[in-house]
Amino acid sequence: MAMESSVWSPCDYSHNVTFFYNLVGKKISETWSPRDFFVIGLGLTVCLIVVLANLMVMVAIFMNHRFHFPIYYLLGNMAAADLFAGIAYANLMLNTGPWTRTLTKEQWYIRGALIDISLTASVANLLAVAVERHQSIITMQLHSKMTKRRVVLLIVGIWAVSTMMGLVPSTFWNCECDLADCSTVAPLYSRRFLIFWAVLNLFTFLIMVAMYTRIFVYVRYQTCYAAQHTSETWHRQTVINLMKTISMVLGAFVICWMPGLVTLLLDGLLGKASHANAYEKFCLVIAECNSLVNPIIYSLRDDEMRRTFKKILCCLCRRGGDQQRELSPVEVDSPLPEETLGCVEKSEDQAVCTNSKEDSWTLPVV
């Protein structure tokens, strides 16, 4: 009787990863297929671009003292989250396909937790940026009056919540004690957890829509009111630029996240009948692209950020040129003019970028 009770125990932790994949009908390929090579190649390429783009944003914010304000600290944290997302997704790509059979349950949970933490942190930072812009624009300020201490606490809170969300499936909200609740997309995850995670992100999206809509309505009202005292063309252009930014932010979120969120909802609600495994990997690649779009929208539309990028690349090119000249037996005595190159060499080991024109402070477009 004791043995029978043990066999039919609802919480049998002896099952391996392959058991859960077979349970939900998710096939683990024996060999690499062309589809696997395509998905992995595309995913790793996106990861590399995501890491480099967000690393450039973080370096620019660190180097330029004009970016040492709350909005740019949040953008830097968002870049860190997106960079972590690129690393986490690369780890997923290198532990998928036939390699899935070799994973223990702990390794499988860690693989999923890294994705959950990074993507949750990215979405949370999007919400934090929306809140900061709402507070600043409504109060007609260039930057919010948030202290550095509050910014640090906000950033720590974002990562704390993201970490908790990533650890929830591995700690208690999984299907190891309820095999009928196993997801087809993530076989060890509970379908109820996927529904919760998808609804939470959709709710976050609705909050962002409400905030940016209020910002647009407020700015449009202010520009219409002030049009009697200023140029009508300038105010019309202000509204158009704001509309473009809002459309890009919301459009990028919808395009990148909506397919994945809908897939999770269908999987949670319908289970095997949703056939989510047929397109879930492509949805994950699209969601990861949001980590690439973020630095483009929030940073590259800032003129000061673009100038900082050029200075960083200029210094890197100058350092590479100096190293080549040191290795070359031919001495070159005709360097490019400083005003053309934009970099001044201070010593053999240090290069400092300069700009002949006075840099102007620009208001973040978000």
Image: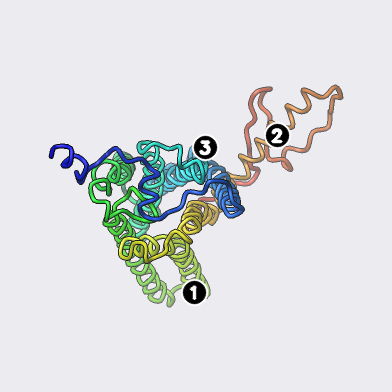
Residue type at numbered disc 1? Arg
**From this viewpoint, is residue 247 visible?**
yes
In the displayed structure image, the side of residue 2 where residue 11 appears, left or right: right
Secondary structure beneath disc 1? Answer: helix
From the viewer's side, name the closer residue of 269 and 197: 269
Residue type at numbered disc 3? Met
What residue did someone put label 1 on? 236
User: Splitting the image into 4 quarters, where does residue 107 fall?
Assistant: top left
Q: Position of residue 36 (x, y in %)?
A: 56, 51
**From this viewpoint, is residue 67 visible?**
no
Check the image and report above or below for 229 versus 269.
Answer: below
- In 3D space, how far apart are the residues under numbered discs 3 and 1 (Cα atoms)? 35 Å
- In 3D space, how far apart are the residues under numbered discs 3 and 2 (Cα atoms)? 17 Å
In the displayed structure image, the side of residue 105 where residue 351 appears, left or right: right
From the viewer's side, name the closer residue of 182 and 305: 182
From the viewer's side, name the closer residue of 231 and 282: 282
Colour mapping? rainbow
The residue under the point 51% across, 71% down is 237
Q: Position of residue 201 (x, y in %)?
A: 33, 58
What residue did someone put label 2 on? 318
Q: Position of residue 307 (x, y in %)?
A: 59, 47
The residue under the point 48% across, 55% down is 281
Secondary structure beneath disc 3? Answer: helix
Q: Earlier in the sequence, mark 3 or mark 2?
A: 3
In the displayed structure image, the side of residue 322 where residue 72 appears, left or right: left
What residue did someone put label 3 on? 63
Badge 3 density bin: few <14, some 14–19, many ≥20, Cα 10 Å:
few
User: Splitting the image into 4 quarters, where does residue 149 fall?
Assistant: top left
